[in-house]
Amino acid sequence: MIFFPHRTYTYGVEDILGYINQTFPYFRDISGYYYGAEKNSEDQALTEKQRLFKINKLSLLVATKAFGMGIDKPNIRYTIHLNMPPSIESYYQEAGRAGRDQNDSYCYILYHKDVDKKINLSFFNNSFKGQERELGYVNELLAEITFPYSDNVRRIQELVVDELGIIVKINRWQQHGFDRLYINSDEVYSIGNQQRNKSFGYINVPDLSSVVESDVTRAYGDYGTCKKVLDQLVQFIKTEKPSGAPAQQWLDTLFQIPKKPGIEEVLRKTNEEYSYIEIGFENDKINQLNDYLRNKYDQGFNEYIIRSAISYCESPQEFAKNLTNKYHAATGHWLDFDVRDEILADPFIRRIFPQIRLDQDTYKAVYRLSLLGVISDFTVDYRTRMVSATLRKCSDAEIISELKKYIGLYEPQVIVDQIDQKLTGNARQYSNSVLKEAIKYLIEFIYDRIADKRRRAIDEMERAILAGFGKSGNSAFEEAVYFYFDSKITPELRADLKSLQEVNLDLVWKYITKTKGKSDEIGHLRGACSRLLIENPDNPVLFLLMAFANYSTPDYDLKVAQADFRKGWELFLTKYQMSFSEYEAGLKKFIELTIGFNKFTKKLLEPELVRVKIHFLEANPSRLDAVFDILETSKISDLNQLIILKMPGENSSVNFLCGILWIHDNDAVQALRFLKKSIDDDFFLNEGLFNKLMNYAKNKEEIFKAILAQILVELEPSYLNSIHKALEDDYTSTVLLEQIINSIKRINNKAYEQFGQIK
């Protein structure tokens, strides 16, 4: 079995199987494919492929993950994943279909660092388009419901269904001077490794003549059935279009469907408990954009180009760029450079991008509202592309109750109990709508919890793969998967997390100490954290334990360990409001414990103590004592890694620290800017500060002292004699004195003359 991420294209089932059969003809008669079907007729054909594979008529099956999870075929010898699976669970389930007869089997993953994660993230980003966009889709449905423009092609399509009871799909084809309506059914047939819709034939639009499908394989039923459908369509066109109007012109006509009141208005106006509403799969934004592009830029734009451009697109900038690329792909020629530049900067395109609601966005919005009880039931009609929803008139208390019920499935009661006050307070202050605040809370929660969980699963899968590239090879990958599912620590740690009344550092110390620095125990700890972080993606205890486990493994990616380490402390500080003193003490203990078990982590962790002190400066902009504490207890190289500022900010403490760092970097101009800004804003250059600077400079290099002297004279010339007196014991170099004198000469002549006497 070979697993693929897509149905078609470069990494798709159909394309790759075609390549395999062309390259290795032996496989043609013994290979098949399977993927999630969109229609019943497709499903039947794919089920047959699955059956043939199970009874050994096919020896090679290429499939997406939609291939039956419960398939119990004992003699699968190989599984190959063309792309990294989205989670360790997915890999375990899919690879686990091999070797069920207990004989040796082999499971491969083909991995490339520039491709695999990117494919998984494209699926992820298409499912989670961003909180603002998702909130916009729901708020749109609450305010008003718009529908895509309709056309006469869709109209006659519906008439055939109503009149003959046969579902048809009409595609208009206009190329090389031809204008045809191809009439297809929803049934499929196989051609090579691909499936196509069966056909009735086509209609020539200019003269409304029809051509019945003659290929028996392609045809839907017999000649008479196909002819009947085509004749009925021709009759509909002749009857429905205005007398004498060309068929082309009538088919080109688009008309807007009137918008309808939104869900909130429907519920507000009714006294009934239940109401009914229809929601189109899409809104009218693609039509609006199509009109805009055709009128402003080029008549070659169409809805197909827009839909291609928006697929798997994450930002307005990317969408605008895709529009020009897809235009080229569809038309064969490029827009002029100035037109392309204008499209990339067009504010209307950027504004409308997040408003385009597609079918998957609509399903999600409807489901979110159903979680809150506002939609009690809904049905999806793929033929009319409509969602029929039953609305329920809920009180604010009922909406909050439904939200709490859902959140309570994931969060402790202490979080659930805060929902009432938060929603009612926000409704009073912002939206005057508990429903809108509940939707906002729900979407934020889904992103914080579920989206983070999915993203974490992708990261964990890649981590396991990368472990297999280390010195231990495949055994490290096997170990990562084994510990993920079978860590002896998981049950105990999960129970400890659930029983916590308050999230604190006690569990961190407990489990670090339990490992005793032994590699096997650390492996169990990492496996437990990998598994539980997917269940609890915002738990700081798990992030710190994961960081400890990764720091303690010599061939592990230390950047990943550092990211977990920082994320854990960030959550303690922000979500759980840890005090700064507790933070600093906890960090020191964590570093001491980790270094105690693994001395090689010392270089990696000690700079993190400096980061803590810088965090303190950022929170306390007027603490000069903290600046000198950092300077006297930290390595300059560590500070330079953590603070890279080119322009002074608003924090006097950070500005002063940066000024000293620029002196160490021998840049008098930058140093003066930062020190002057901090002194002008907050610190007064008095005797106390002067003495601190002299004391700090005491054992520094001569060039440091020269630049410091230059800056101090610029800031306050009256300190000239004091500078010399304070540092005269160190001024043993005539070269240094010359440097200082020349520096001061550039500042002002009066000071230069005074210093010349000292010389």
Image (cartoon, grey):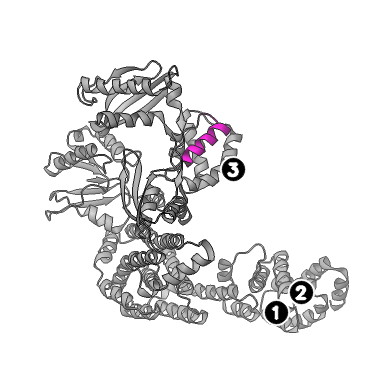
Q: Secondary structure at mark 1?
A: helix
Give the quarter of the image for residue 416: bottom left
Q: SS for tag 2?
A: helix
Is label 1 in contact with label 2 (beta carbons under 8 Å)? yes
What range is drawn magenta here? 285-299
Q: Which mark is residue 332?
A: none
Q: Which residue is mark 3?
A: 345
Residue 753 x %, y %:
88, 73
The answer to whether residue 431 is above or below residue 9 is below
* Image x and y of residue 70, in percent: 18, 52
Q: Is residue 293 magenta?
A: yes
Residue 494 is situated, as x and y percent measured from the top left of the image, at: 29, 73
Query: Marks 3 and 1, Cα distance to the nearest angstrom?
Result: 51 Å
Crowd rating for badge 1 (residues with CA inside 10 Å; few <14, some 14–19, many 20+): some
Distance between the Cα atoms at labels 1 and 2? 10 Å
Relative to 702, does residue 102 appear above or below in the rendering?
A: above
Q: Amino acid at mark 2?
A: Leu
Residue 176: tell me if it is visible.
no
Name the image quarter holding the C terminus.
bottom right
Closer to us: 18 or 517: 18
Disc 3 crowd, CA 10 A, few/some/many (<14, 14-19, 20+): some
Q: Nearer the viewer, mark 3 or mark 1?
A: 3
Toward which corner of the image does residue 217 lie, by quadrant? top left
Confirm or deny contact between disc 2 and disc 3 (CB under 8 A): no
Q: Amino acid at mark 1?
A: Leu
Q: Which amino acid is tagged 3?
A: Ala
What residue is drawn where x is 81% and y is 67%? Answer: 742
The numbered dot on residue 712 is 2
Residue bearing mark 1: 693
